[in-house]
């Protein structure tokens, strides 16, 4: 399951549970070590004990995470790691365990808002002992993703790159255009595609989250990372000029119904798999679908990667820094023991990332991972972009209260659908977004 799917399904439950107040500051560990982590060792020293990990990975993902555990045990054979897969129920199961005073040692969490609640209640344990390693291997942006209340608490071990667009190779060839990482050229190519007889865009307007993803990619490139951070926390209003500027750019894509598969009305009815199928087809209905690295997994297609369909980074706008908006699975520690520390420190190494990356279905933001270990060319493109990004930010809508950022039929999802219907109404939509944000934030 994609990171987006898990986030959409889990965020509302996570925030609802937090409203019930996570009441415990973390339970004791069965290793008998103290919560202060006394006696914890550095990455190269041998330790013993056990580590319990609760996660969302099931099925094939669970099998691949076991490869990471096996690689860890090659270095630390005296530590027993037990993994408990709970899938999309993790927010509820983990919150219940924490409240009952029996949390796992480590949990894999896809919602930063859930981690924030655990930090506020004193349940999550800081990772100061490994922050310098993460800084060196991943960089500032990933440290920031895991920083809450000015302290480092979470390592984004598995990442998702949402700053990509996918295209039908034959459609591009027939129109005489090539993939580009420049926004103005991208828009010009769209006009050329339309003139060649095929709409440029396939848009999943029935799913509001695809529209928030498009906006977020435009916003971080037009407003910059600082404004992105401020908007994600509602420190600036949705009526800010930076929001209106991004909406104006977005309208250059969603505002031309004649260049969208099925027109505007068709886009409002197409869900995400349909939007992908419109492009990854022998008889495409559009040339481009703008979404993340999970696009190929949305449908079955006879097209071969690279030959039949390919991927390009989301275009830069006005010489913006190389930026990636994404999601990720953040490893968070609840019991500070030598064994837990050793496992967390291992997860920050390129060896841990390689153990999963070479099996496929995994992207890492670890800049020291040799991208040649990824099993195919397209995955190397999308995954390496995360590690190479100058700026990485977590999906903005996933950082909002669920009622505003991740609920069908209301908040940002509905308002961006309204914007798809009326792309000239920039001021009006911005005002409605701000009104909805004020209500959600109380």
Image: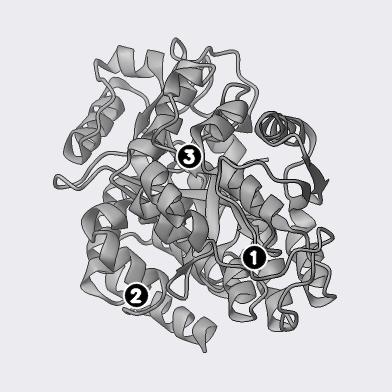
Mark sitting earlier along the chain (1/3): 1
- Location of residue 360 in the rendering, given as x and y in whole percent from the top left corner: 60, 24
Q: Is residue 188 left or right of residue 352?
A: left
In front here: 271 or 378?
Answer: 378
- Element class at badge 2: loop
Disc 3: which residue = 292
For label 3, the SS is loop
- Mark drawn on residue 238: 2
Q: Residues within 10 Å of mark 3 (few under 14, many from 20)?
A: many
Q: How many marks?
A: 3
Count neighbours of disc 2 (C-alpha within 10 A) and say few if under 14, some if 14 to 19, many if 20 or more. many
Residue 18, given in percent of the width and then of the height, sits at: 69, 77
Contact, mark 2 vs mark 1 (Cβ under 8 Å): no
Residue bearing the label numbered 1: 38
Sequence-earlier tag: 3 or 2: 2
Left or right relative to 380: residue 31: right
Seen as rendered, the residue at the extreme left is: 318
Place residue 174 in its image quadrant.
top left
Which numbered disc, 2 or 1, marks the residue that appears first in the sequence? 1
Labelled disc at residue 230: none
Name the element at disc 1.
loop
Q: How far is the residue under mark 2 from the one under mark 1?
A: 46 Å
At 59% from the left and 74% from the top, the residue drawn is 119
Q: Nearer the viewer, residue 342 or 368?
A: 342
Disc number lying in front (1 or 3): 1
* Residue 287 visible in this rendered orientation of the protein: no
As rendered, which of 276 and 348 lies closer to the eye?
A: 348
| In the depicted structure, whether residue 337 falls above or below residue 304 | below
Q: Position of residue 212 (x, y in %)?
A: 45, 57
Q: CA distance from mark 1 to mark 3?
A: 42 Å
């Amino acid at each position: 399951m994609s990171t987006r799917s898990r986030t959409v399904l889990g965020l509302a439950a996570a925030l609802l549970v937090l409203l019930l107040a996570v009441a415990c500051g973390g339970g004791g560990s069965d290793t008998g070590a103290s919560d202060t982590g006394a006696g914890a060792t550095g990455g190269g020293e041998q330790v013993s004990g056990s580590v319990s990990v609760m996660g969302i990975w099931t099925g094939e993902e669970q099998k691949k995470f076991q490869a990471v555990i096996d690689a860890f045990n090659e270095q630390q054979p005296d530590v027993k790691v037990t993994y408990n897969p709970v899938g999309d129920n993790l927010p509820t199961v983990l919150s219940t365990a924490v409240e009952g005073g029996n949390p796992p040692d480590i949990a894999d969490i896809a919602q930063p808002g859930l981690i924030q609640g655990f930090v506020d209640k004193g349940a999550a344990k800081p990772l100061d002992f490994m922050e310098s390693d993460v800084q060196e291997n991943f960089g500032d942006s990933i440290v920031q993703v895991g920083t809450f209340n000015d302290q480092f608490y979470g390592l984004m071990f598995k990442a998702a790159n949402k700053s990509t667009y996918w295209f039908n190779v034959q459609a591009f060839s027939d129109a005489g255009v090539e993939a580009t990482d420049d926004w103005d050229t991208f828009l010009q190519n769209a006009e050329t595609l339309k003139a060649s007889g095929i709409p440029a865009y396939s848009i999943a307007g029935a799913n509001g989250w695809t529209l928030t993803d498009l906006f977020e990619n435009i916003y971080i490139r037009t407003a910059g990372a600082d404004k992105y951070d401020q908007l994600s926390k509602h420190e600036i209003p949705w009526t800010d000029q930076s929001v209106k500027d991004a909406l104006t750019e977005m309208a250059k894509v969603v505002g031309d119904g004649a260049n969208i598969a099925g027109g505007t009305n068709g886009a409002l009815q197409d869900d995400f798999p349909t939007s992908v199928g419109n492009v990854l087809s022998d008889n495409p209905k559009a040339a481009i679908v703008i979404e993340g690295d999970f696009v190929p997994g949305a449908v079955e297609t006879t097209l071969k990667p690279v030959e039949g369909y390919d991927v390009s980074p989301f275009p830069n706008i006005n010489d913006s820094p190389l930026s990636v908006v994404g999601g990720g699975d953040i490893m968070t520690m609840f019991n500070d023991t030598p064994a837990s520390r050793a496992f967390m420190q291992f997860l920050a190494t390129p060896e841990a990332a390689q153990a999963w990356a070479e099996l496929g279905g995994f992207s890492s933001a670890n800049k020291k991972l040799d991208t040649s270990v990824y099993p195919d060319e397209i995955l190397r493109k999308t995954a390496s972009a995360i590690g190479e990004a100058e700026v990485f930010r977590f999906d903005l809508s996933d950082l909002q209260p669920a009622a505003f950022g991740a609920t069908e039929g209301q908040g940002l999802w509905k308002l961006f659908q309204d914007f798809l219907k009326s792309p000239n109404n920039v001021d009006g939509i911005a005002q409605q977004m701000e009104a909805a944000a004020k209500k959600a934030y109380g």
